[in-house]
Amino acid sequence: MEKSRDVPIIRPGSSVDIVWEDDSGRTPSRLLPSMVYDIDRNRMILSQTMPPLTRSHLGTILALTYLKREERHIQRYGFSARFVDILLEYSLVSTEKVIALVFEIHSKPEAANLRWHYRVKPPADSGLMLLLGEEKMSVIDISLSGVRFSHIRKPPFKAGEILSLTLVVGRNPLEIDARVLTAWLPSGIGSASGLQHVRAKFLNSYKEFEYLLGKQIFTIDRQLLAKGQQVP
């Protein structure tokens, strides 16, 4: 099969790490090692992970990272991809049949580290602004898969509620729906204030959204590292 032009430096047989973040957003991201079976344009076939990905995870946007040896060092690259299918009897060259995962590549690889898909805490001058209608939300942290923000609203946010958000990245307004996963009162603040912390998962993500937000997250991460503010 023709090798993807979007991933020019990764080949069948290469090792990749799938960065997995659970829906709650309260546990650390984990790496799921895998191996590339094949690449055909923007589709990539990988080995099953342990613990395994299942059909309940189909449609999830994930970050994939891999290592590339360069002249004087080893560089990690990362890109986003959507988990689109599971092949129960994928044939290897040896005629052995295995379970395989199919991903649709959504972005070109760029130099990254394992924080590439982790949540970052954007400073006030981060170039990100989150709006619900015309109201500005205070972003606490954000990743490609979701956002945590604080806001005062009555009636309060409820788990399962669908929000129509606008994420402004630089000068680019990006419309995105999000489902509220959890909403809680910050410790030490009474319920009378109406202030809530909300964790929401992005829904129906699209390439422009993933590209612009992913690039901005990477930029913020580098800036925070330079200031010594981001936890490795």
Image (tube, grey):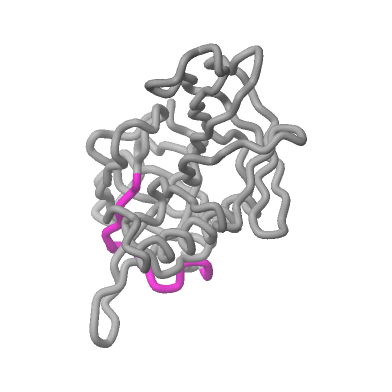
x 35%, y 58%: residue = 65
Along the viewing direction, whichever of 134 and 93 lies nearer the viewer: 134
Q: Residue 135 is drawn in which quadrant?
A: top right
Q: Residue 44 falls in which quadrant of the image? A: bottom left
Quadrant of the rendering where the C terminus is positioned: bottom left
Q: Residue furthest bottom?
A: 71
Q: Nearer the viewer, residue 159 or 52?
A: 159
**Residue, x 49% and y 53% (percent of image)?**
123
* Residue 125 seen anywhere in this rendered image of the structure: yes
Please determine whether, in this image, residue 116 is positioned above or below residue 196. below
**Residue 150, percent across and down?**
53, 31
Tell me where residue 120 appears, x and y as whole percent. 42, 49
Residue 40 is situated, as x and y percent measured from the top left of the image, at 49, 60
Which residue is nearer to you in this view: 142 or 16?
142
User: Vertical placement of 42 versus 180: above or below?
Assistant: below
Residue 119 location in percent, x, y? 41, 46
